Amino acid sequence: MPHRATNEIAVTMVWNQLGNALRAPGDAVLHECAIVLSLEPALQDLVLRARRRFASAMAANQLEPHITLLYCGVRGPAEIARLSAIAERHAMREVEFRVDGVGQFSNAAGVVTNLHYRVESPALHALHADVVAAYSDAGFVPRTRYQGALYRPHISILDRVILSPADMDDGLPLGSAGPHRAGGAHLVGERRAAIS
């Protein structure tokens, strides 16, 4: 049996990419991009069940459940190809993590705009650091302050919404704390505008 390096991670799961995965779009379109990890199916189901507790209008435009490794901002086709290559270099990495309850993010006015499951994992922070280093080495300038020590890994239940205190009840399903797995890093994007 061949010897394996102790820091090598054996990948045992085939990770599905999100429906909005990007590689190198052929058209001249700007996309708002992020490098993300796919979740194991049971955790995807948990997030989708949690979303069903909210008004359909709130849940309708949410991205598929994932963990963001790095927000990359609005980018054009040439940059998307380079970002996709960065994600692909990390696609074979898997991380284990635990769900640590429900959290929220607020805007500058104190309005809750994101409801999520908090996740904790030293391996996830290490993978984030590796992706940030590759991003920087490729000449990209950060488009978010939420990296490094400010990185807060999470799985969004609802994002880019305005939530009232009535929306923040204790009835969200928590499922198992874990450990859970995520992997298959890839680039995702939402179309923003055509380049003129």
Image (tube, rainbow, N blue to C red):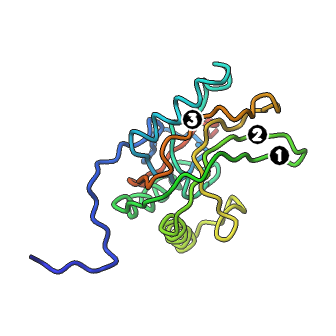
Q: Amino acid at mark 3?
A: Pro
Residue 90: x %, y % from top left: 40, 63
| Residue 162 in which image quadrant | top right
Numbered circle sitting on residue 173: 3
Question: Is tag 1's residue or tag 3's residue first in the polypeptide sequence?
Answer: 1
Instruction: Identify the residue shown where x is 39% and y is 39%.
Output: 41
Q: Does 143 sit above or below residue 164?
A: below
Residue mark closest to the camera, 1 vs 3:
3
For label 1, the residue is: 107
Left or right of residue 7: residue 74: right
Q: Does 70 sit above or below residue 55?
A: below
Numbered circle sitting on residue 2: none
Tell me, yes or no, whether the two marked residues, 1 and 2, touch with CB atoms within 8 Å: yes
For label 2, the residue is: 113
In depth, the one of 87 and 109 nearer the eye is 109
Q: Residues within 10 Å of mark 3 (few under 14, many from 20)?
A: some
Tell me, yes or no, whether the two marked residues, 1 and 3, touch with CB atoms within 8 Å: no
Q: Amino acid at mark 1?
A: Asn
Residue 85: x %, y % from top left: 42, 59
Residue at the top extreme?
A: 56
Is the C terminus in the top left, top right, bottom left or bottom right quadrant?
A: top right
In depth, the one of 1 and 29 nearer the eye is 1
| Residue 112 in which image quadrant | top right
Q: Kindly state the secondary structure of the residue where label 3 is placed.
A: loop
In depth, the one of 189 and 139 nearer the eye is 189
Instruction: Identify the residue shown where x is 51% and y is 50%.
Output: 177
